[in-house]
Amino acid sequence: MARNRPVRRLLVGSLTYRWSAGHRHKRYQDEEGRPRCDGCREILSLRQEGAPGRLFIVFHEGPGRIVNDGMFHDGGVLRTSDRAYLNLHRPGVVRALLDAALADGHDFASAGTAEINGWDLIDGALERLPPSDRPARRDV
């Protein structure tokens, strides 16, 4: 299931980015043709105005990785091994993830949609957050 989220604006120097965050499930049919839903994930969608590319930073649920599942808030992602936590609805977090993706070589000038594993960016994003914006480690 996907919830529509407003597209927000992020200014980075002279560049403008549009972004939104949301929750998605993988939909499929079981062996008997019944619709099923599995694979919770939080997705941060970014595009740079005037550039053809789009970026999806995806946080899939999995062992040691928690995303919104009805027991955790929308937009929250948590790595349980060290309680590293980000809220994808905070502009400072979006900026930190964008900067981490750009540092890893993402280029919005390339047409099409790129998908990046958000868990690979979490440490870089946390390092880029100013101390006042760094979230406290979450107890779950």
Image (cartoon, rainbow, N blue to C red):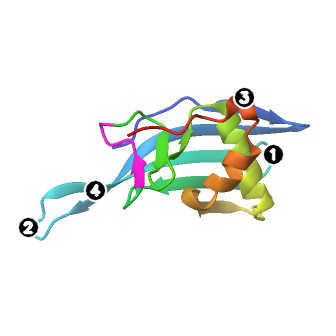
The span shown in magenta is 65-71
Of the two numbered discs 1 and 4 on the same chain, state the one appearing first in sequence: 4
Of the two numbered discs 3 and 1 on the same chain, state the one appearing first in sequence: 1
Residue annotated with mark 4: 38
Viewer-nearest of discs 1 and 4? 4
Of the two numbered discs 2 and 1 on the same chain, state the one appearing first in sequence: 2
Q: Check disc 2: other Cα within 10 Å, few if <14, some if 14-19, many if 20+.
A: few
Q: Check disc 4: other Cα within 10 Å, few if <14, some if 14-19, many if 20+.
A: few
Residue annotated with mark 2: 32
Q: At numbered mark 1, what does the secondary structure look like: helix, strand or loop?
A: loop
Residue type at tag 1: Gly
Q: Position of residue 15 (x, y in %)?
A: 86, 40
Residue annotated with mark 1: 50
Q: Nearer the viewer, residue 112 or 125?
A: 125
Viewer-nearest of discs 3 and 1? 3
Q: Which residue is depicted at the point 38% across and 41% down?
A: 68
Of the two numbered discs 2 and 3 on the same chain, state the one appearing first in sequence: 2
Q: Position of residue 50 (x, y in %)?
A: 81, 45
